[in-house]
Image (cartoon, coloured by chain):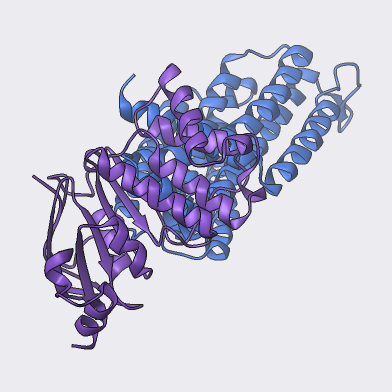
Amino acid sequence: MSGALRCFGVLAAEAFRDGLRRRFAFAVALFMIAGLVGAESCTDFSNAQLSLNEHTIPPEVVAGFVAPLLVGWQALAVMVIASVVASDHLARPLHEGSAALWLARPVSREVFAAARLAGALGVALGAGAVLIGGSSALVLTRQHLPVEPALAAGAATAVGALAVAALAMSASLVLGRTAVLLLAVAGIPYVALANAVVLVGQLVHPDVELGGLLGAVDRFGPPLGTAVIAAVAPWNPHVEASGAFAPAFGRLALWAAGSVVLLALTFRRVEIE
Amino acid sequence: MFAFELAAATKRYGRRPALIGVDLAVPAGTAVGLLGPNGAGKTTALRLLLGFVRPTRGAVRLQGRDPFDAAARRGVGYLPERLRLPGAMTLRRFLRVHGVLAGLGGEDLAREVEAVAESTGVRDRLGERLESLSKGLAQRAAFAAALLARPELLVLDEPTSGLDPLGVRDARDWALAARARGATVLVSSHVLSEVERVCDHVAILREGRVVAAGPLDRVVQPGETLEDAFVRAVRG
């Protein structure tokens, strides 16, 4: 194993432990439990009689609407968790001074930042694996839906979490934590809202394009919501979404790569106490 | 071969100059004391050497390389002035992580951690969290980390801070042992008597400039103590 990889491994493991030791991790654990309890109750309708305007609705149709919404908001939550953990996971050891101890060793800035990012993502994606994995397992076994969309949604969530965590970490090197938290907690849902509005709009009027800020965010921003919803859209037999996932996932991957590069460039300019 | 070099190195924080055109070249294997009153630029010089900050002008070389290059910091042990140890880690894990970063692994790592903990008097604290250590023990723990893997360049910023008289003597012995095996030792300190005992060269900074530098017996004139030479240099 190369020296840089060994350094990354040991620092990432430490960053992960550091993430687990934080009080926020306790809140994440509670959130996971609540999320799974919620998923358990809202996926258990196989034996129910569902009707709308006196028309009986088959459970698989209900599942086709409920499952994407469930996985979609959980993916959103995982991305918010990733950005919140990342918002001071690099900045805190820099301000406290413990980073200087590690960076006095033959550890490049890039390796150190990547390790802190990996530690933050480890916490968020660990929570995501439990939450989305558990909910998907419930949906798949109870409603007999295919597994591929769940895997694609998991991949989109991971890449989205990487993008927002790297952006939050970069921002934390130049902004205060409160500002970064506000950006993350408001920004991620806003992007997801823009994606959702455009998706719904296209279902109703496929040729109409959304303008304004929402439209611009959807067109040029990271497709956090689009990629996840496009991944799980095949669960709904009434939605034609074939071919929507790959371009959205590709654009999200580009955003993730760009965010990581931005983090590396920003950290190179930081003066260490 | 110079262990490190500052060539016309200037560092400004905003408009405030911390170092101004500093020239300093330290051959490998020497023990040099970096002296100066508060705010003279000693810590800034160390931060430049370790690649924590970049010079505004001039050049800095550490073991022949740009200190920003991670490879330049291979074989460097660093004891910072303001200790900010990651409190939730146990001392053993802290030292093991340092050991891995220094290139140790396997049995060498375990052996070296035990040995350095033994020599710095913290072996029976290896299982304790760093946050539970007293100031003096934390200083010893940080010393242990700096001494891991037998560094070729030992950078000590106020090494006796927080140590009791026994600890001060131990710290001196560790620095002297490093010097005796051929390591370069750089000590930034206000405790002139300790610098005098450990170092064979000194550099005195005043307001960001080097005002005296060289072998101890050239900087300190006959009949003077290092304190006399220091006062003469900083008062101009």
The blue one among the chains is A
Please tell me which residue lies in front, A129 or A248: A129
Report if residue B221 is visible in the image: yes
Q: Is residue A156 left or right of residue A257?
A: right
Where residue B180 sits in the image (x, y, percent)?
Answer: 26, 41
Where residue A4 sits in the image (x, y, percent)?
Answer: 32, 30
Residue placed at 46% from the left, 23% from the top? B111
| Residue B102 in the image: above or below residue B173 | above
Which quadrant would the C terminus of chain A be assigned to in this image? bottom left
Q: Is residue A266 left or right of residue B128?
A: left
Count of marks placed on residues: 0
Q: Is residue A238 left or right of residue B33?
A: right
Which quadrant would the N terminus of chain A be assigned to in this image? top left
Residue furthest to the front: B223
| Residue B219 in the image: above or below residue B231 | above
Please tell me which residue lies in front, A127 or A222: A127
Please tell me which residue lies in front, B58 or A251: B58
Report if residue A244 is visible in the image: no
Residue placed at 55% from the left, 32% from the top? A228
Query: Which image quadrant for residue B195?
Result: bottom left
Query: Which image quadrant for residue B209?
Result: bottom left
Please tell me which residue lies in front, B193 or A117: B193
Where residue B204 sits in the image (x, y, percent)?
Answer: 22, 72
Residue placed at 68% from the left, 14% from the top? A145
Where residue A131 sits in the image (x, y, percent)?
Answer: 70, 29
Q: Is residue A260 left or right of residue B233?
A: right
| Chain B drawn colour | purple
